[in-house]
Amino acid sequence: MTASAHAWILTDLAGQRFAVANVEMVEYLTEAHIMNVPLSPDYCPAVMHWRERLLPIVFYHRLFAPGAAVSELHHIGIVAYQRHPGEPLLHLAVVLSQAPYRVVVTDEENEALPECYRDPVHSPLVRAVFSLDNAPVPVLDVNYLASSTLRESLEQQVSSPS
């Protein structure tokens, strides 16, 4: 028997698609008041007000292309994650190039990990990969996306010579 699940497809400012689990997508916004935060990582340079909280804003495309251009922000997805089971939900904002949309994914649609996620810094971002329109779509581990481990790994990658 084939198992299926709902997921949300998100598209970053570089046009790269990725997915989050259905329960992780909390809200979609078309505008936000954004405040830059000095000395923040390139991929997470700002915060925004949301439901009486400050949320970090992730520019996902900058994980793979540091310093990449940022256009006007008209699409922001709010995603939830938990550090440990039973703990309160935490949230972060992800800048998108278009509105997210929901899909049904089956376990028969498994795909290989896309090349850009194969290095040790980026591979923990991916929980699974499925096919959509004959292209691989990684399902993100939002907890890792929000982690200090990712930030530290990216900083180490930049500081160490290739």
Image: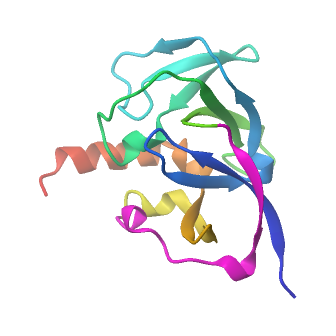
User: Is residue 51 visible in the rendered structure shown here?
Assistant: yes
Task: Place residue 29 in its image quadrant.
Answer: top right
Magenta stretch encompasses residue 52: no
Judged left or right of residue 41, residue 126 is right
The quadrant of the image that shows the C terminus is bottom left
Q: Can you give x and y, in whole percent of width and height, for residue 3 in the image? A: 83, 78
Colour scheme shown: rainbow
Q: Specify the farthest residue to the left.
A: 161
Q: Can you give x and y, in whole percent of width and height, for residue 108 in the image? A: 71, 82
Q: Is residue 112 above or below residue 99?
A: below
Q: Which residues are magenta?
A: 99-119
Q: Give the residue at x 62% y 67%.
A: 133
Q: Is residue 6 above or below residue 143?
A: below
Q: Can you give x and y, in whole percent of width and height, for residue 55 in the image? A: 61, 24
Residue 13 or 77: which is nearer the viewer? 13
Task: Place residue 109 in its image quadrant.
Answer: bottom right
Q: Specify the farthest residue to the right.
A: 1
Q: Give the residue at x 38% y 25%.
A: 40
Magenta stretch encompasses residue 108: yes
Residue 59 or 160: which is nearer the viewer? 59
Q: Give the residue at x 69% y 39%.
A: 79
User: Is residue 151 visible in the rendered structure shown here?
Assistant: no
Q: Specify the farthest residue to the front.
A: 133
Judged left or right of residue 153, residue 84 is right
Q: Is residue 7 above or below residue 74?
A: below
Q: Give the residue at x 45% y 63%.
A: 123
Q: Can you give x and y, in whole percent of width and height, for residue 132 in the image? A: 63, 66
The quadrant of the image that shows the N terminus is bottom right
Task: Place residue 30 in its image quadrant.
Answer: top right
